[in-house]
Each structure stands twice: as C-alpha cells, then as structure tokens.
C-alpha cells in the first residue's frame, strides 16, 4: 500500500480517508464529495465533528424511539458486556433472553405469545416467511407455499424480503428472486387521498384485490400475506380506514396467515406498542426490530401466535422443531439493551406521549401546505411526510438536495424517499422541538424550490 495516505486513530470522528467504506443505500460518490459525518448524539440531537448541532427528525433510521444515549440503556449495555459478552442460542440460552421475550409478548395483542429472535428487520421478514411456509408443512399442507406482498412494500433486503417487497429499485438488479410470489396493489392515490391527516377515508376496497389473487392461484396454494400496517420506507403511506381489518377478514375466509411487518411501526411510533393494537387487528405474526433497543444494539424478531408455535411442538422431544436461526439471535448485549429500553418506554410513558402529541405534530406538518412544490402531506402518530414535485430532469434530485441541505446548512436530519421527505422523530420530542423541526423544514423546502 502507498504510504501517501495518513490515517487517524480508528475511533476518530473526522476520518481523512473515505474510500474503504461502501455505504448502504447511499449515493456514495456524491456523499464522499460532501460528507455528512456524525460524531456523537444525545437525546434529540446529533453533533458533527466540529460540534454543530443537528436535530434528529428521523430517529436515526426510524429506530431511536427513546432518544439518543439514554443513560439507563447505556448503563445496561455496559454492565452486560462486563458480565456475559456472548452465549449461544443454539442448544443453550441465557436468562435475559427469556425475560425479554416475555416482556415483548406481554406488549403484543391477543395470543401473540412466542418470540423468535434475530438481528435485523430483514432477517425478521425472512424468518416470518419461513415460519409461515414451515407451518403449513406441519399441517400436511406443504403445497401452501405462495407468498403475497404488496406494491411499494418494504420488508428488508433478504431474498425473501425483496421478493415480497414492492420497491422496484430494491428488486430490479437481483434476478428472478423467489418464485411463487404475488403482490397486492399499493394503497396510495394522491387524487383521492391528498393531505389526509392520519388514515385516509378512501382506499379500503383495495384490500379486496386479495380475493382476485387468491382466485387466480387457489387458496390451497397460498401460505401468507405480508404487509406493513403503515408503509414507511416508500414515503409514509398510512393505511386507509378499514383496510387492515378487511385483509384480516379475507385471510380468515381462505385460511391464509397474515403477517404485519412492524419494524417501523412497533414500539410506539403510532402511539401504541404495535400498530396492530391501533387498528384492532390481530395478525398471525408480527415482525419487529429498530425500536426494540432504541437502535443501540441490533435486535429483531418475530412474534408468533400460540397456535402456530404449538404446531411445531410435536414429534420426538430431542429433535429440533425449526431448522432456522442466527448466531447472534438473542445476543446478551441486545437483550440487556431491550430490557432497559422497554423500561424507559414504560416508565416515561413514551407510547402514550406519542399518541398525545399526534395532533400537535400533524398541525405543525400541515402548516407546510401551500409551500412551493408541496404535492401532499401525510401524518400518522409521530410520523410525517412531505411529498415534493420532482424536478423535470431528475426524479429524486429535489428530495436529495433537500436532505443534504437540511443537514449541512440547517441542522436537521430526515430521510429522503425519492422526492418525499420522511420524518419520524424520537418519541421524547417536545412541542418546541416539533416547531424547530418544521421551521427548519420550511426553510429547506423553500431553498430547493
């Protein structure tokens, strides 16, 4: 290697060589010309290497629901690392994992009583799909292997998740993906739904397309339907009123499993532990990740209804019931982080707080209506999106410019999904900080007009 490059310490917050790290879901060449580097974080704010304050309008990556560097969570991780750094979950276990599983099952609605741990939302989606297909094998219906997702859906980046997912850019380079997959239509129609607060009135009937798909393939071949209660990564699409209940009814009619991907909506984002509770629908499985540890240590999982779990608990007791899992499933540090995070949510009533702030958040977001290029505004719980008109020469360019300008010049972080600006702040946000975010967002929208 050439000696021309000089390197700072590995933990230096201002690196002077950006070539080695190939960043995920990032325009790498553009980023490395004008980096957006974060050095530290506390509560509602990030700080750049030069000490500049940036308010976190996206809870990191939809995950830091309890705010940054919360002392109880940090202390729990540190203590766990000093006591038990790792324990295998294949044929062995550690006590904290059982405690966390019980706590999560208590938060889930109905008889969603069993938790299978993994490490990311992508792994959780693939795990749920595998459990669904394997479940039908336990029932002597191995022909039920077809999976149904939804257009514009996001279920991570595993081959299962992108197969049932419906975001074109995530799919187009990776071949034919899984066979036997179909997709429901997405639920967004700007002409009918523009500037809806919360769940739009129009669109519940779109669930009925599941009947057409089932008729095409026959119910005896369909294993499961997987949807996000709120489609997040595609630009914040709340479900139409009654849509999720209708999906549940159709799945029940044909004996199809229903999976809710709650990687984003879980742990308070919509004002409840899970969006399933908000909508009064009990799915057969819930995937979770992100908010379970407030983003501190990777953790995810699938919550499974009792009947599905129990269907695997047959045969000789010394034989593995489900040949699936990950080395770091239920990692001790992740479990310690999860327990401390769940305590913070409970003790500070952050789920209830999110619900109580929903109207103030929506009022602030909708104050942006009428600004240049604003085509739509969508809110739900403590989530919001501003959809901007695309530049004639480049779809997504205005959104990218807005995201970069917000960080570099206005001290605000949010997500850009094409030309939609998506916001999902930590649940500890105050009304003054809501105002701060929206004031900065207004300046950014005007600047990229």
Image (spheres, rainbow, N blue to C red):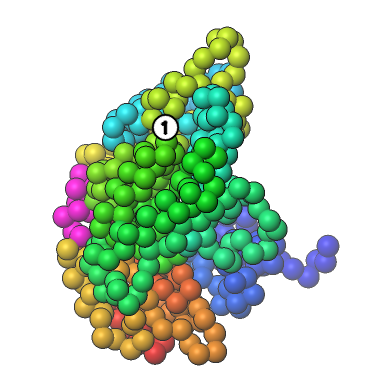
Say which quarter of the image contains residue 256: top left
Could you tell me which residue is drawn at 44 percent across and 27 percent down? Answer: 308
Describe residue 276's horizontal placement relative to residue 94 as left or right.
Answer: left
Q: Secondary structure at mark 1?
A: strand
Q: State the residue at coordinates (36%, 52%).
A: 229
Quarter of the image containing the C terminus?
bottom left
The answer to whether 119 is drawn above or below residue 414 in the figure is above
Quadrant placement of the N terminus? bottom right
Q: In x, y percent, where is residue 181?
A: 57, 50
Majority SS type along the magenta span: helix
Q: Position of residue 16 (x, y in %)?
A: 64, 68
- Per the rendered image, the range of residues in magenta is 349-358
Residue depicted at 23% across the width and 54% down the height: 354
Viewed as shown, does residue 157 lie left or right of 386? right
Callout 1: 10 Å neighbours few (<14), some, many (20+)?
many
Name which residue lies at 29% across and 86% down.
371
**In the rendering, at what x and y percent does residue 195 appear?**
26, 74
Q: How many marks?
A: 1
Q: Which residue is mark 1?
A: 304
Residue 174 or residue 82, whichever sits in front: 174
Where, by quadrant of the figure, is residue 197 drawn? bottom left
Identify which residue, 30 or 218, lies in the foreground.
218
**Residue 193 shown left or right of residue 151 in the figure:** left
- On the question of residue 366 being in view, the answer is yes
In this rendering, the answer to whether 263 lies above or below 150 is above
**Spot occupied by residue 224 in the image (x, y as percentages of width and height):** 48, 42
- In this rendered view, identify the residue nearer to me: 315 or 346: 315
Q: Quadrant of residue 431?
A: bottom left
* Residue 250 among those drawn in magenta: no
Question: Can residue 121 be seen at all in this image of the molecule?
Answer: no
């Amino acid at each position: 290697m050439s000696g021309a490059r000089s390197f700072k310490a590995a933990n230096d917050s201002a690196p002077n060589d950006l070539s080695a790290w190939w960043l995920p879901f990032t325009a790498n060449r553009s980023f490395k010309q004008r980096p957006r580097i974060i050095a530290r974080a506390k509560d509602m704010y990030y700080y750049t290497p030069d000490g500049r304050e940036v308010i976190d309008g996206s809870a990191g990556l939809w995950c830091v629901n309890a705010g940054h560097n919360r002392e109880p969570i940090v202390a729990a991780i540190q203590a766990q690392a000093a006591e038990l750094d790792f324990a295998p979950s294949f044929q062995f276990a550690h006590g904290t994992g059982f405690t966390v599983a019980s706590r999560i099952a208590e938060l889930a609605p109905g008889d969603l009583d069993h938790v299978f741990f993994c490490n990311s939302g992508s792994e959780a989606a693939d795990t749920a799909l595998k459990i669904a297909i394997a479940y039908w094998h336990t029932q002597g219906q191995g022909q039920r292997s077809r999976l149904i997702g939804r257009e514009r859906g996001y279920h991570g980046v595993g081959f299962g998740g992108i197969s049932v997912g419906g975001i074109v850019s995530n799919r187009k380079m990776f071949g034919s993906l899984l066979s036997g997959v179909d997709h429901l239509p997405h639920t967004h129609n700007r002409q009918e739904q523009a500037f809806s607060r919360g769940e739009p009135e129009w669109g519940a009937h779109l669930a009925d397309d599941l009947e057409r798909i089932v008729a095409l393939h026959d119910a005896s071949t369909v294993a499961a339907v997987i949807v996000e209660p709120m489609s997040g990564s595609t630009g914040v699409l709340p479900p139409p009123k009654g849509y999720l209940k209708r999906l549940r009814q159709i799945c029940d009619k044909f004996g199809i499993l229903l999976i809710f991907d709650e990687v984003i909506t879980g742990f308070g984002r919509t004002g409840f532990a899970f969006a399933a509770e908000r909508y009064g629908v009990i799915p057969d499985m819930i995937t979770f990740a992100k908010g379970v540890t407030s983003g501190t240590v990777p953790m995810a999982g699938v919550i499974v209804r009792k009947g599905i779990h129990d269907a695997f608990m047959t045969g000789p007791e010394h034989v593995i019931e489900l040949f699936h899992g990950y080395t770091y499933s239920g990692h001790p540090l992740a479990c310690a982080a999860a327990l401390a995070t769940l305590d913070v949510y409970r003790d500070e009533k952050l789920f209830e707080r999110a619900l109580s702030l929903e109207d103030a958040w929506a009022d602030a977001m909708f104050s942006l209506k009428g600004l240049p290029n604003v085509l739509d505004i969508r809110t739900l719980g403590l989530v919001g999106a501003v959809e901007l008109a695309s530049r004639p020469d480049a779809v997504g360019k205005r959104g990218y410019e807005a995201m970069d300008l917000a960080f570099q010049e206005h001290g605000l972080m949010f997500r850009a999904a094409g030309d939609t600006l998506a916001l999902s702040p930590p649940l500890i946000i105050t009304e003054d900080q809501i105002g701060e975010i929206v004031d900065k967002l207004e300046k950014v929208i005007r600047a990229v007009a």
